[in-house]
Image (spheres, rainbow, N blue to C red):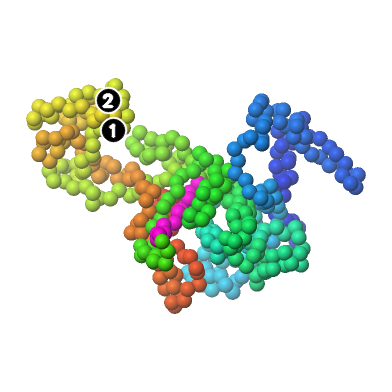
Amino acid sequence: MQKISAFTEDLYNQKFRILCDLFPEAVTEYKDENGQIIKSINFDILRREFSSPVINDIKQSYSFTWPDKDFIMNQAAQRTTKTLRPLREKSSGKNGTPGEFDSENIYIEGDNLDALKILRETYLRKIKLIYIDPPYNTGHDFIYQDNFSENESEHLQRSGQKDSEGNIFYSKQNKETDGKFHTNWLNMIYPRLRIARELLSDDGVIFISIDDNEAANLRKICDEIFGEKNFIAQFPWQSRQSVQNDTDISCNHEYIIAYAKNRRQENRRLKESNAKIWYNKSDFVCFPLPLNPEKFSNPDNDPRGAWKADPMDAPNIRPNLTYEITNPNTGEKFLPPPGRCWRVEEKIFKKWLSEGRIIFGQKGESRPQVKTFYEEKKAFGSVDNTWWTAEKCGTATQATKETTGLFDGKSYFDTPKPLKLLSQIFNLVAPDKDSII
């Protein structure tokens, strides 16, 4: 039999080797207590390799921190001896055949930190989309304690709680009266997000459900792990439509926070001028939604088909896009509105006018407008917005009905999410059939 390691990849050594290759002059040696020679990095030399003041005056730098952060930052890199064990009796195949493993989907039960570390071995930089629904830290959540440096009896003595799988909690519930209320949650989420980023492909993206309790802290953590420039949006989701009457203000929304591995900085909008390169870039961009044909009509029987009237003006002011347009029906002259310009140069406008693409209102007496034809624009879709209403994305109540409908009216999940919400995410990411989610 082929011998395999019982450990996942040691990321400490991996990063150390990279530093040694990049900065050999910073590599030094020392003897440990057993007299063995150990290689190390001299960080004073490493700092000098950077021109000032890249790493100077650390105490005065902007940062987001909390108790235990130095320790918890290493949790993602620590090795695990856990492995995945297939359970044929709980498995089913593509056609629902019991005991088969050919569905191309994997459901993992266990501590997700260990699971992520195991998945990293096979799926490093291969995941297109990650969606996570972590505890919201409302004061009633179970927050896992990931510090396994103590033995079991020490943990039980300190925490006083252990679940059926042997996982240890900080406390039975992460109550707001706990002095480490936010720290516990940050310690839980940080290493998982670190590994999640490593799993994402170059054009990958992560969507995270959260509410007001930890939304601000989650944004700060994600800015640190993924980078501020890779922030996509913080989508408000109308999770409930009914009014909560047992408090002074009814909270009817949650958030979906999205970050990319590499957020596209230019050419985000798909259009004629960039269509040849738009799909081929190796960074993340939100896909346009399908164009709604109901917003188009053909009142004048234009042979080019259904159309809608769009404004002729556009943002900003450019001299070559500022000129007078004369209404041929009334002789009235028009300039762009204050602070704006026309969409195209005068030469192109005259071409559009001759082609019957310019109209001046329903009666021909208004400002110029452009005919936008459905057949010409359907390939480029429409831009979605960040306002995720209950009508568009469903509610928590609808999600509960959907899940209980699968289990003969029984509720096995406390905070399910509706199919409409997940469909909204999938439509933005638009993974192809080979994408791993």
Three-letter code, disc 2: Leu
Where, quadrant-wise, is the N terminus in this rendering?
bottom right
* Neighbours of disc 1 within 10 Å: few (<14), some (14-19), many (20+): some
Q: Report the disc number at residue 321.
A: 2
Residue visible at 72% across and 28% down?
48
Does the image show residue 380? yes
Determine whether, in the image, residue 356 is placed left or right of residue 116. Answer: left
Range shown magenta: 249-259
If you read the primary sequence from the N terminus, does the residue marked by circle 1 or circle 2 appear first?
A: 1
- Residue 271 at what x, y percent from top left? 34, 38
Determine whether, in the image, residue 57 is placed left or right of residue 317. Answer: right
Does the image show residue 395? no
Residue at the extreme right of the image, as rendered = 35
Determine whether, in the image, residue 286 is placed left or right of residue 369. Answer: right
Secondary structure beneath dot 2 equals helix
Cα–Cα gap, marks 1 and 2: 9 Å
Q: Report the disc number at residue 55.
A: none
* Neighbours of disc 2 within 10 Å: few (<14), some (14-19), many (20+): some
Depth order, front residue of 17/330:
330
Is residue 85 found inside the magenta-colored segment of the image? Answer: no
Three-letter code, disc 1: Ala
Is residue 253 found inside the magenta-colored segment of the image? Answer: yes
Residue at the extreme top of the image, as rendered = 319
Secondary structure beneath dot 1 equals strand
- Residue 203 at what x, y percent from top left? 50, 44
User: Label 1, on which residue?
Assistant: 314
Task: Kindly check if marks 1 and 2 are in contact, taking CB atoms under 8 A apart as contact.
Answer: yes
Q: Is residue 346 above or below residue 146?
A: above
Q: Within the image, what quadrant is residue 106 found in?
A: bottom right
- Residue 212 at what x, y percent from top left? 48, 54
Residue visible at 66% across and 60% down?
145
Determine whether, in the image, residue 370 is placed left or right of residue 146. Answer: left
